Amino acid sequence: MDVRLSERLETVVSFVIPGSSVADVGTDHGYVPIALVRRGLAKHVLAMDLREGPLARAREHMKRCGLDGQIELRLSDGVSALAAGEADTVIAAGMGGELIMRILQDGRRLWDTVAHWILSPQSEWEKVRVYLQENGFAIIDEKMLAEDGKYYVVMDVMRGEMEPLGMAQAVYGPCLIRRRDPVLLEFLKREEHVLSQILSGLAGQTGKGASARRLALAERLACVRRLLGEW
């Protein structure tokens, strides 16, 4: 079976340190564990999911790839079924930011044994970055990519202190800004257009709620324009 990863999942795999013991949370089709074993990047891989259906699909894909028995599959709500010491790397990709933060919070008992977290939240990037900083995590690297008209980020995270995040860093990523990431530049240009359009639409609205929203959007737009001006 030929398993081709999307650019996002290729980025996830690229952040795995060779020789790691990996737990892939929300494994879905099992493509990331398959790639890790085929490429010899991990010494042990756990494919975990909340539901039996995805695990059954992953098991079938692994069997068709000739990897039956080489990857352990486990039913788990987040990292609830992961014991301390079983993995030094946890992948949580393809889920909302709130869920990723819940997985991290529920896995506090693992923070001393899991050295490396690879996170790809599909939403609420700002909240995730702030949560990481407030809880003693550092974003070592980050990549933004565009696929099928959507933008994604993949965060390479380890325990450690991170420089305080200003608004721009929290919203758009300190590593991406520092590196002048070309995909981030494309995203910022789109953000400027979208925010300008929304503000124009709110121009005639009155009331406390509309005023507060205009103020928040204007602040975000000023942040975007400041970043674009520094590019």
Image (spheres, grey):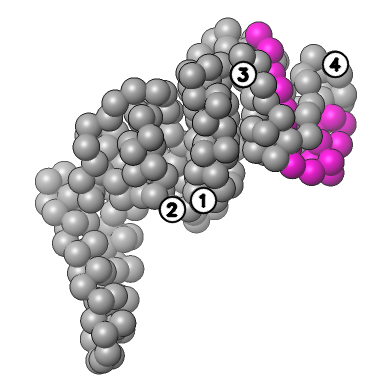
Q: Which residues are magenta?
A: 43-60
Q: CA distance from mark 1 to mark 3?
A: 23 Å
Whether tag 2 and tag 1 are in contact, CB under 8 A, the answer is yes
Q: Residue type at mark 2?
A: Glu
Q: Residues within 10 Å of mark 1 (few under 14, many from 20)?
A: some
Q: Residue type at mark 3?
A: Ala
Residue 2 position, x and y percent, is 76, 27
Residue 223 position, x and y percent, is 19, 56
Image quadrant for the C terminus?
top left
Q: Residue type at mark 4?
A: Gly
Q: Residues within 10 Å of mark 2 (few under 14, many from 20)?
A: few
Whether tag 4 and tag 3 are in contact, CB under 8 A, the answer is no
Determine if the magenta segment contains residue 116: no
* Residue denoted by label 2: 124
Q: What's the mark number on residue 69?
A: 4
Marked residue nearer the N-terminal end (4 or 3): 4
* Residue denoted by label 3: 84
Q: CA distance from mark 2 to mark 1?
A: 7 Å
Marked residue nearer the N-terminal end (1 or 3): 3
Task: Please determine whether, in this image, residue 40 is positioned above or below residue 130.
Answer: above
* Residue denoted by label 1: 98
Task: Please determine whether, in this image, residue 225 is positioned above or below residue 17.
Answer: below
